[in-house]
Structures are given as C-alpha cells and as structure tokens.
Image: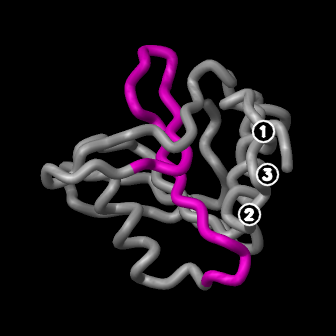
Amino acid sequence: MVMGEIRRKWLVLQPEEFVRQLLIHFLIQDMRYNRNRITVERGVTIGGEPRRTDILVFDQHMRPFLLIECKAPQVPLSTDVFRQATHYNGPLRVPYLMVSNGRESYVAAIDYEAEAYKFLPMVPEW
C-alpha cells in the first residue's frame, strides 16, 4: 500500500498504480507542476459512457492541459494504447497527450486544426 500524493488516501500498489504514482511524483517534484491542478482517475463521459482518465493536468486557467494514460510496466505501448488515450481525449481536447508504462513514455503535442501531432522529447513545461 502507498499513500497517493494527489488523492491523499491509501492505495493498493498494483503495477499500473505504481506507474501512476511515479509519474505524479515526477510531475510535481521534477517538473514543478502544481499539485492542485492534477486530477487522478477523473470521470469523463465518452459517447454516453462513463470513463476515467488516469492523470489529467489543468493549466493556470483550469483548462485541460495534459492527459496521461498509464499502463502496467509489462504492457507494451501499442497502437491500441494510443487509440485509447486519443479516445479519452475526445471531449477534453488537451494540447498534450502522454502514454507511459513506466519503462517507456511518449508525449505528443496535438494540432487540432491541422489534424496532426508531433512527438516531443520531454514533458512540456507547465
């Protein structure tokens, strides 16, 4: 069990939760993201169905900024993982999308007008 840095409750440290907690720690401690702008397992409705985002970060104006989809370390970051993250992003339209299994991470900047994306070398500054 581990005390969640955002939710402030004890969590069973399953492999995906371990990755989630590592990323939250990285965002707060290394990237200096504001912990009050980070939500974990936030509810979102997609096609009328309730879903939960793993990590969603809001900018200074409380607009969705970065959506992170976490997977367990043994789960390869396949096309299906990217599709899932893109699907969850549908109603959010974040400028940055990330997928991670703790071993590999990919971050993309999304250009909605051009319907394109560009992979970035690191997580964007908050």
Instruction: Estimate the spatial distance between the alpha carbons at disc 3 and disc 1, rounded to whole Å.
Output: 15 Å
Instruction: Estimate the spatial distance between the alpha carbons at disc 2 and disc 3, rounded to whole Å.
Output: 12 Å
Q: Image point 46% across, 74% down: which residue?
A: 81
Residue 60 among magenta residues: yes
Task: Identify the amino acid type marked 1.
Answer: Trp
Residue 44 place in picture, x, y as percent = 32, 42
Residue 107 place in picture, x, y as percent = 55, 59
Q: Hey, which quadrant is residue 4 in on the image?
A: top right
Q: Image point 73% across, 32% down: which residue?
A: 9
Q: Which residue is mark 2?
A: 14
Q: Looking at the picture, does residue 99 appear above or below residue 54?
A: below
| Earlier-in-chain disc, 3 versus 1 | 1
Q: Which residue is mark 1?
A: 10
Residue 36 visible, this orientation = yes
The nearer-to-camera label among 3 and 1 is 1
Numbered circles on residues, count: 3
Q: Image point 44% across, 62% down: which residue?
A: 118
Local SS, label 2: loop
Local packing at callout 2 (Cα closer than 10 Å; few below 14, some 14-19, many 20+) is few
Q: Hey, which quadrant is residue 65 in on the image?
A: top left
Q: Which residue is mark 3?
A: 22
Residue 79 in the figure: left or right of residue 46: right
The magenta region covers 52-75
Local SS, label 1: strand
Task: Identify the amino acid type marked 2.
Answer: Gln
Local SS, label 3: helix
Residue 55 in the figure: left or right of residue 64: right
* Residue contact at pointers 2 and 3, CB within 8 angstroms: no
Residue 75 place in picture, x, y as percent = 62, 82
Task: Identify the amino acid type marked 3.
Answer: Leu
